[in-house]
Image: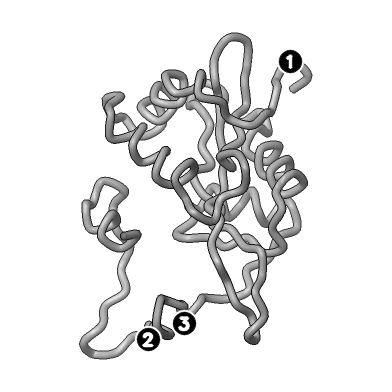
Amino acid sequence: MDNLQVRWMTDEDELDLADLTSAVYGLSPGVEQQQRRNWLYQQNPYAAIRPELLVCQGGQRIVGQTGGISVPLFRDGIPQRAAWGTDTMVHPDWRGRGIAGRLITDWSQRCEHSLCLGFGPTDANRQVLARMGHRPLGQIRGYYLAGGAFHCAESESTVVAPLDVSDLRIATLWQ
């Protein structure tokens, strides 16, 4: 772990991040990955001065990443500094070395948020968070949108189901 450097992402990391995403998800590097990253981290109107994406560099390559998407959140009517914890991944050749835990720990220490939200964490991410002492607080049932609150509750006409990361309906959800 001593030869690994965790730092904030820079523009120069784009190609390495595309390679990392491809290695983890088996996708071909493409413009879509860069556009998604830009949309989530650099064009986010609630983001801090820099994209909130930490990378872990091992030698000359990026071997892991984790990030946060700043969002407005109100708790009991009081604005909270919050972010969705997102995109924690470690290159398959570098797994089992504590990189994910180090990335999450560093992000939680460096970020400026009091609350971190999870959106569909993988079982591996849940295990890392549990080992670090994080605990789930439950599911969010109300979302603040322009003009009011949107409530999501399961009913006969509503089905809650996981979506594959390649499902294009995810882009519609975020928009």
Amino acid found under the numbered disc labelled 2: Ala
Amino acid found under the numbered disc labelled 3: Gly
> Which residue position holds label 2?
153
> Which residue position holds label 1?
3
Mark 3 and mark 1 lie on one chain; the one further toward the N terminus is: 1
> Which residue position holds label 3?
142
Q: CA distance from mark 3 to mark 1?
A: 44 Å
Q: Is residue 134 above or below residue 21?
A: below
User: x and y percent of residue 154 in the render?
Assistant: 34, 85
What is the crowding at mark 1: few (fewer than 14 residues within 10 Å), some, or many (at least 20)? few
The residue sitting at 64% across, 80% down in the picture is 75
Residue 78 placement: quadrant: bottom right
Mark 1 and mark 2 lie on one chain; the one further toward the N terminus is: 1
Residue 136 is tagged as: none
Disc 1 is placed on an element classified as: loop
Q: Nearer the viewer, residue 160 or 123?
A: 160
Q: Is residue 44 above or below residue 78?
A: above
User: x and y percent of residue 95 in the render?
Assistant: 57, 29
What is the crowding at mark 2: few (fewer than 14 residues within 10 Å), some, or many (at least 20)? few
What is the crowding at mark 3: few (fewer than 14 residues within 10 Å), some, or many (at least 20)? few
Pointer 3 with pointer 2, Cβ within 8 A: no
User: x and y percent of residue 85 in the render?
Assistant: 56, 53
Is residue 93 toward the left or the right of residue 29 in the image? right
The residue sitting at 68% across, 33% down in the picture is 98
Is residue 145 toward the left or the right of residue 35 in the image? right
Residue 36 placement: quadrant: top left
Indicate which label's residue lies in the foreground, 3 or 1. Answer: 3
